[in-house]
Amino acid sequence: MVPHLVTALTGPINELEQRILDTMPAIERWFRLEWMEHTPPFYASVDVRNAGFKLAPVDTDFFPTSWNNLTEAMLPLAVQAAMVAIEKICPEARNLLIIPEHNTKNTFYLSNLAQLRRIFHMAGLNVRIGSISPEIKKATVMELPGGESITLEPVVRAKGRIGVKDFDPCTVLLNNDLHAGIPGILEDLHQQYLLPPLHASWTTRRKSMHFKCYEEIAKRFGKLIGIDPWLINPMFDTCGNIDLSSAQGQSSLRERVDVLLAKVKKKYKEYGIKERPFVIVKADNRSSGMGLMTVRDANDLPALMAAAALGQPGAGLQELILQEGILTHERMNDAVAEPVVYMMDRYVVGGFYRVHAERGTDENLSAPGSSYVPLAFGGGAQLPELGVRPGASAPNRFYMYGVIGRLAMLAASYELEATDPEADLDD
């Protein structure tokens, strides 16, 4: 199924699409050279927003949890990418342990684990799922819709290595962002590969570092293909360690929002865009959408903060990122939609549309009530239809999404290099 893209009928994205298709050989060579110098995260997903005049990533997740949304047609790509990724890290790998989130009541998440297990089993590995949740004290079978089941086993540690009963893996795959902190059981592992590394977790990660890296890459990529990097890059600012319950903190946030809105307005004027610009205010140090605000006027901040329960007395200091808001003008059956690109190693392996019937074009779609429609990425992400009029080919649009996803993946590799606590030891 190829989703109908409303934006296929609009202009500026068509120009960007044409530029990307015309320079495809140069783009693919550029990526190839970059991956010779930088190591991509083991896996990631990227939320992309297509405003019709701009296409950019708005979030990159190092611990993607919706693999069950990939269709059967996408599995061969994922399996091949898994083989390549494992071979680079541990060519003789036989056993792989998946560490999941603690949320074992969510059957959607458990289905995601089942899909990951399937992918790595088909890549030639013995796969077990080991939980570090204190609630899992013995092997626990979890039944899934459709008759499938998975078994969660308690993780044990011995001689500096972790595993489950009678299972010693050389590779440990984290599907847990560790937002509550890094448990000691995962630290200082002996001759085991932990993927992604602990410094990819929200204990240390900051979105602002990711978008700083992405901004640098967008500038270089823009120069490569001859476009304004703003067309693929969301402007951002930070407001770190701010007390939103104080008048000083609120004033500082209002000033920064004003400055960023002014920058976006200037760009809108330059391109003749009639939409009203907005800024998204969200936590810099966690993945959750809680407390996220859409701001069109800094004077609206007090009311928005009250509605989002931000700035409450006793909340303490907060780290915030302010991000240029990007509309999504895509629809699935009249519901607002945004593409999500899934990658393993340096390869686009699939994706889906996140759809929400009750949300607007300027709102966060990763919220209760969202649904998912697979993208036809099987052939489209890497095989554009050359010579086809811009906007007329869904595979061309999907190729463009794949390019943006890979740019974000490259930014993620820069980010992990910059934040690696052992980098100085290696120099």
Image: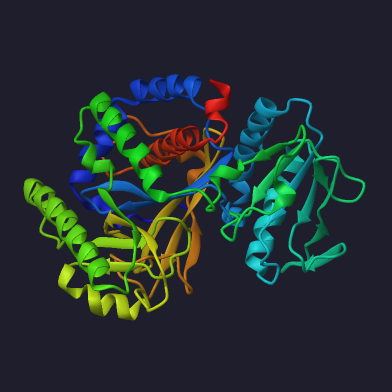
Residue 383 quadrant: top left
Q: Residue 76, relative to residue 269: is it above or below?
A: above
Q: Would you say 220 lies left or right of 39 here?
A: left
Q: Position of residue 424 (x, y in %)?
A: 52, 27
Q: What colour-coding does the image apply? A: rainbow
**Residue shown at 31%/62% (left/top)?**
281
**Residue shown at 28%/48% (left/top)?**
234
Towards the viewer: 314 or 294: 314
Q: Residue 284, relative to residue 405: is it above or below?
A: below
Q: How many marks?
A: 0
Towards the viewer: 131 or 421: 421
Q: Would you say 137 lies left or right of 81 here?
A: right
**Residue 394 shows up from this direction:** no
Q: Position of residue 356 (x, y in %)?
A: 41, 69
**Residue shown at 46%/39% (left/top)?**
412
Q: Position of residue 280 (x, y in %)?
A: 29, 61
Towards the viewer: 314 or 230: 314
Q: Position of residue 386 (x, y in %)?
A: 34, 30
**Residue 129 shows up from this direction:** yes
